[in-house]
Amino acid sequence: MKTIRIGSGAGYSGDRIEPAVELADKGDIQYLVFECLAERTIAIAQGAKLKDPAKGYDPLLAERMQAVLPLCHAKGIKIITNMGAANPVAAAAKTREIAQSLGLRGLKIAAVSGDDVLETLKSGSHRIEETGAPVSSMGNTLVSANAYLGAAPIVEALKAGADVVITGRVADPALFLAPQIVEFGWSMEDWDRLGKGTVVGHLLECAGQVTGGYFADPGVKDVANLARLGFPIAEVQEDGGAVITKVAGSGGAVTTATCKEQLLYEIHDPSTYFTPDVVADFSKVTFTQEGPDRVRVAGAGGRARPETLKVSVGYLDSYIGEGQISYAGPGALARGRLALEIVRERLKLTGVQTTELRFDLIGVNSIHGDALSTAGGQEPYEVRVRVVGRTDSLKEAVRIGNEVETLYTNGPASGGGATKSAKDVVAMLSALLPRDLAKPAIDYVEA
Amino acid sequence: MKLRDIAHSRTGDKGDISNISVIAFDEKDYPLIEAAVTPERVKELFREVVHGEVVRHAIPGIGALNFVMQKALGGGVTRSLALDAHGKCLASALLDLDIPDRAA
């Protein structure tokens, strides 16, 4: 039976680069996929594109392409990535420029766009899922609206002979599903196989998270050689059967336990995982350890795809101001608490306008809150005061950090290492769009 | 004993929804985990953090539970004021749950 090997070269936009080079070099793969687009990334990239029409793609695109293009070109490994972010066409042009500067010839690069549905969403009677409010009521706070496209345009680009396919917003598993559809000639309505291909994509899309990254817990779950963590490879067969593995000799581990954790990562009802291509069913998946760092995946299924596409809507939500300062040694906790009280009173006294405030002691209660954090009962040696608040303007946000910083000369004894920041917050909501309203487009350039 | 003695866990995030898996190291311990880690207990544990409902999905084929918690991430990952905006550390608190020892 025909088998292909797909490597996952990034789990997020800032991920390590050399494990991807290792995959291209020693992974015996035919496809190298980079999933680099977090929920908010595209909204921020949209801002960059507005300032410069040649920008708006992933900031690490050039570095990643420089690193992997020569090997991929030499070995005929096809690259699929959503590093196009808000500007796949500019990302393709940049990739072409890099290929030419490396002396690589005969490289076909596809840019998949059409995920940008901001104008469509503004003009219709569409509503925000979380709030029920009409999108049109958000006015000029709207920054971006991108539909999660499916595998179809990537499939088309690969069939047209593209060596590199660069997309904007596409469902993460679709980046991995597309090569399986192309190689095995699966129908776009073979829900069972599309479900199987989707589980492979889901397991791979966070790269190191399935090979022992984000897993180690010393003494309970030990993982060897994490500084040299290998990224995953899926060995997929025509019938949808698959094995998850990694490059021999790399760090980390692929076990049934690492696969189970990743299977349920960011999943709600495992029997109903919505994607643009299929409603996948992960509830009957089983894992079998077939050998060292080799886990067989079976049992995934699927049902007919949804009639709507999820749209990620970016909008200017608010401003956040923050300040931090540390206290250490005997009495650190009491001085930290006093510091928080002072800032709380100062924000009132000076009339800083906030819509939400938070007072944390890092090392004491900042992560899980007071109720859970007192379990240990031991006083920490050092604490870090953190005051953070939401405001309607940058000017007000700045005042929050200032009130923490002034603790230097006005607050409890021996406070040190004060920092402050203020920023605007582009936040994300979602909407559902009838799928025929998003029209994928493909542009090709050749090096 | 602690849940951490027999299970491992990972947290995921989507908007203002957090999900936490609880996975038996040995699938034989799954019934014990299923009996001890109820959605009510998880809701009580995270009462300061989670402000919406907690739903539990069972995946017995891999000896796992998946808890889906609404209004759990300070209004959503992209606008939360929390230090851990993604709620990625929540799994560690769940593993600290006391559960009955295995029957002798």
Image (cartoon, coloured by chain):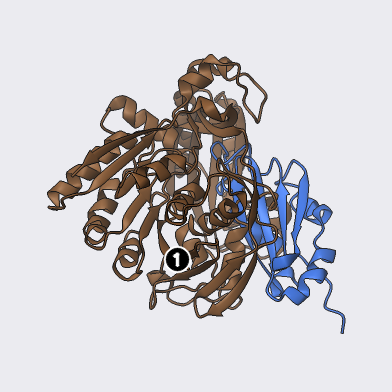
Chain colours: A brown, B blue
Using the rendered view, name the quadrant where residue A24 is placed.
bottom left
Q: Chain of mark 1?
A: A
Using the rendered view, name the quadrant where residue B23 is placed.
bottom right
Q: Which residue is mark 1?
A: A2
Mark 1 lies on a secondary structure that is loop
The structure residue drawn at horizontal position 68% and vertical position 48%, both measured from the top left corner, is: A272
Residue A182, image x and y in percent? 43, 51
Residue A433 seen in render: yes
Residue A44, image x and y in percent? 41, 34
Q: Quadrant of the C terminus of chain A?
A: top left
The kind of residue on which mark 1 rests is: Lys
Relative depth, front residue between A348 and A242:
A242
Q: Residue furthest bottom?
A: B104
Q: Residue furthest right?
A: B103
Relative depth, front residue between A437 and A227:
A437
The structure residue drawn at horizontal position 55% and vertical position 67%, both measured from the top left corner, is: A215
The structure residue drawn at horizontal position 39% and vertical position 49%, both measured from the top left corner, is: A13
Residue A314, image x and y in percent? 50, 30
Residue A45, image x and y in percent? 38, 34
Residue A368 seen in render: no
The structure residue drawn at horizontal position 52% and vertical position 14%, both measured from the top left corner, is: A123
Relative depth, front residue between B29 and A220:
B29
Q: Is residue A85 above or below residue A432?
A: below
Q: Is residue A290 above or below residue B68?
A: below
